[in-house]
């Protein structure tokens, strides 16, 4: 398991493989000075955070090795990140 540390104020836990895909998509948007909303649901609730190039982010992974990226997953997440609703994922229980 890894963590997304957001704005030095909050920490969110994600599976390393998912976090690797999220890092790729989020940093590609922020790198071109684009902001986005990131929303995810888990078994308990829905969360949304506003991501802006000036906001500090830190990605922390539970493993030293980088999981492989799945091009189909990246394409889906990139399409979502460019949509009016922003980047959205649903995390299955136990994932």
Image (cartoon, rainbow, N blue to C red):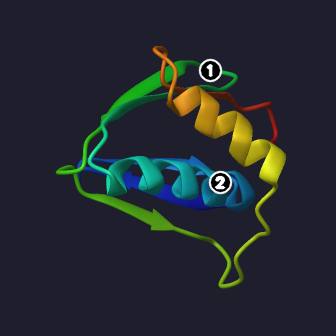
Name the image quarter holding residue 20.
bottom right
The image shows a total of numbered marks equal to: 2
Which residue is found at the position 82% from the left and 44% from the top? 72
- Element carrying mark 1: loop
Residue 53 image point, x, y percent: 24, 50
Instruction: Name, please, the residue furthest toward the front.
Output: 32
Name the image quarter holding residue 78.
top right
Instruction: Name, please, the residue furthest toward the top.
Output: 84
Name the image quarter holding residue 80.
top right
Q: Is residue 1 left or right of residue 60?
A: right
Split into 4 quadrants, where in the image is the C terminus? top right
Residue 15 image point, x, y percent: 70, 54
Would you call the spot at circle 1 few (<14 residues within 10 Å), some (14-19), or many (20 or more)? few
Taking depth in this image into account, of 32 and 80 the one nearest to the observer is: 32
Residue 50 image point, x, y percent: 31, 31
Instruction: Name, please, the residue furthest toward the bottom.
Output: 64
Split into 4 quadrants, where in the image is the N terminus? bottom right
Q: Kindly identify which residue carries mark 1.
A: 44
- As measured in the structure, the alpha-carbon distance from the residue carrying label 1 to the one carrying label 2 is 23 Å
Taking depth in this image into account, of 30 and 44 the one nearest to the observer is: 30
Q: Are marks 1 and 2 in contact (CB under 8 Å)?
A: no
Which residue is found at the position 72% from the left and 35% from the top? 76
Residue 73 image point, x, y percent: 77, 44
Which residue is found at the position 65% from the left and 85% from the top? 64
Q: Which comes before the other along the chain, label 1 or label 2?
A: 2
Q: Kindly identify which residue carries mark 2.
A: 21
Q: Is residue 93 left or right of residue 46?
A: right
- Element carrying mark 2: helix
Which dot marks residue 73?
Answer: none
């Amino acid at each position: 398991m890894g963590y997304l540390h957001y704005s030095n104020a909050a920490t969110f836990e994600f599976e390393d493989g998912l976090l690797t895909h999220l890092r790729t998509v989020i940093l590609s948007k922020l790198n071109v000075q684009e902001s986005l909303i990131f929303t995810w649901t888990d078994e308990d609730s829905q969360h949304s955070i506003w991501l802006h190039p000036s906001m500090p982010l830190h990605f922390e992974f539970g493993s030293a090795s980088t999981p492989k990226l799945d091009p189909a997953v990246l394409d889906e997440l990139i399409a979502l990140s460019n949509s009016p609703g922003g980047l959205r994922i649903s995390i299955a229980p136990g994932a």
